[in-house]
Image (cartoon, helix red, strand yellow):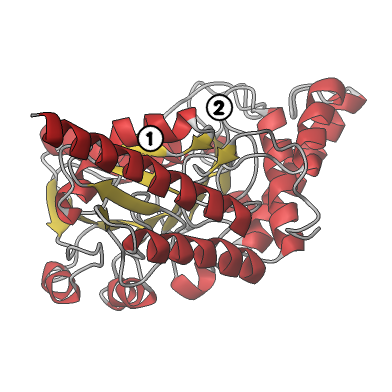
């Protein structure tokens, strides 16, 4: 499958909100979701052929994830409902009373809120390593924060606000050298940047399935390294060890109580296979190239400020319009048939770092099937919108 031959199912709207969720989904993903609903039962909970096929599909999905992220043991992957759930499981299941934990000033609320709660309930010491105004992490501050070594470092790989690469290879190597396990939030980078769990020596990895991995909503991934002990967030039926009144310790059963999301897992596996078929390098060049083009062209428009990173790792481009609320700009673009997103993007820490708090920004994020024509139309529409606005202001000034 190539990017050029996979652009089916588009409607009249120009969709530029792939940092929220990818759209449209590849045909293979849609078909595998449909097949799971029509043909599969619940895995590990019956002797029917449909249950056996379901069990085989789930195992194949784990193996696909292991290959995708360069992990030897597929059993270390847990399926959740989202990156947010994965992060909650990892944070709440690993950190103990009095632990010291590092994070950054560019984190999403999926990290900020669980940590804030545990600071109150478990007396955690949270060290928020500062980032510069472009979103990049202050390495000198990180070096100081790593002494003494904390129990865990939780970093977003790339910002969902402006695409800044926060957890650079240097950041990860500094944590590794200090003996600090890293929980990497790859919600914005999985399916866009190559992520080798082995090369990075990650302690844990959390990501969503519906963004760069091109899967459906309602599915996420959590990887847990074998030497880390994480308590389950939810306990119950696992389809095994049913005679015990306590949760089994074996992975992945320990973390997957209840009936799994079969359509989500099936669609996620198909999405990862589509990404592999298209090629990570191809997708990276396409999406990040378009993001840089959007940023460059926006910088040439009078009255527009682009909050651009020095090192891009994600497809998000954030901008503000002088004298105009981000939501107003996004609504006008929506009326013109262009889908973007406005506000704080569930990341107030990041906006405080970028200097865009409390109003936030307009966020544009191209995706796997975005074209340069889409970018042209977006830029031309924004320019026309601002030209009309300036004309109205000039007419009002004349009559004042």
Q: Is residue 346 visible?
A: no
In the rendered image, which quarter contains the C terminus?
top left
The spot of residue 26 in percent (x, y) is: 74, 44
Q: Nearer the viewer, mark 2 or mark 1?
A: 1
Q: Is residue 100 above or below residue 253?
A: below
Any mark on residue 330, and which?
A: 1
The spot of residue 249 in percent (x, y) is: 51, 40
Any mark on residue 257, and which?
A: 2
Q: Residue furthest left?
A: 400
At x 58% / y 35%, what residue is drawn?
219
User: Answer yes or no: do the residues labelled 2 and 1 have beta carbons within 8 Å?
Assistant: no
Alpha carbon distance from label 2 to label 1: 41 Å
Write down the quadrant of residue 129 in the picture.
bottom left
Left or right placement of residue 18 versus residue 169 in this view: right
Left or right placement of residue 173 versus residue 83 in this view: left
- CA neighbours of label 2 inside 10 A, class few (<14), some (14 to 19), many (20+): some
Q: Nearer the viewer, residue 177 or 9?
A: 9
At x 17% / y 41%, what residue is drawn?
323
At x 71% / y 29%, what residue is drawn?
262
Left or right placement of residue 113 versus residue 200 in this view: left
Left or right placement of residue 30 versus residue 142 in this view: right
Q: Is residue 310 visible?
A: yes
């Amino acid at each position: 499958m190539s990017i050029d031959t996979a652009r089916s199912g588009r409607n009249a709207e120009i969709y530029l909100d792939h940092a929220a969720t990818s759209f449209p989904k590849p045909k293979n993903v849609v078909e595998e979701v449909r097949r799971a609903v029509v043909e599969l039962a619940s895995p590990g909970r019956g002797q029917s052929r449909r249950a056996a096929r379901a069990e085989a599909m789930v195992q194949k999905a784990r193996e696909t994830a292991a290959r995708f992220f360069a992990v030897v043991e597929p059993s270390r992957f847990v399926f959740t409902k989202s990156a947010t759930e994965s992060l909650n499981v990892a944070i709440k299941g690993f950190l103990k009373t009095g632990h010291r934990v590092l994070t950054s000033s560019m984190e999403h609320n999926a990290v900020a809120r669980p940590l804030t709660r545990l600071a109150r309930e478990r007396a955690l010491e949270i060290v928020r390593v500062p980032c510069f105004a472009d979103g990049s992490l202050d390495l000198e501050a990180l070096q100081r924060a790593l002494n003494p070594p904390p129990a865990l470092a939780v970093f977003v790989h790339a910002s969902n606000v402006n695409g800044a690469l926060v957890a650079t290879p240097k950041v990860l190597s500094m944590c590794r050298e200090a003996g600090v396990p890293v929980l990497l939030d790859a919600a914005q980078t999985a399916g866009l940047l190559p992520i080798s769990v082995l090369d990075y020596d990650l302690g844990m990895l959390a990501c969503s399935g519906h963004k760069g991995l091109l899967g459906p909503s309602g599915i996420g991934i959590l990887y847990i390294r074998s030497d880390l002990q994480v308590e389950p967030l939810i306990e119950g039926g696992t389809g095994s060890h049913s005679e015990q009144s306590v949760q089994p310790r074996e992975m992945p059963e320990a973390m997957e109580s209840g009936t799994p999301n079969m359509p989500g897992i099936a669609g996620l596996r198909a999405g990862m296979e589509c990404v592999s078929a298209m090629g990570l390098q191809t997708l990276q060049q396409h999406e990040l190239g378009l993001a840089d083009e959007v940023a460059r062209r926006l910088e040439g428009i009078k009255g527009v400020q682009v909050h651009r990173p020095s090192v891009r790792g994600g497809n998000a481009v954030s901008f503000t319009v002088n004298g105009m609320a981000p939501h107003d700009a996004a609504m006008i673009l929506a009326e013109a048939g262009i889908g973007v997103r406005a506000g704080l993007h569930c990341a107030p820490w990041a906006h405080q770092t970028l200097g865009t708090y409390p109003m936030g920004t307009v966020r544009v994020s191209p995706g796997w099937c975005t074209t340069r024509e889409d970018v042209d139309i977006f830029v031309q529409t924004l320019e026309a919108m601002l030209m009309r606005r300036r004309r109205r202001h000039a007419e009002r000034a004349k009559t004042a």
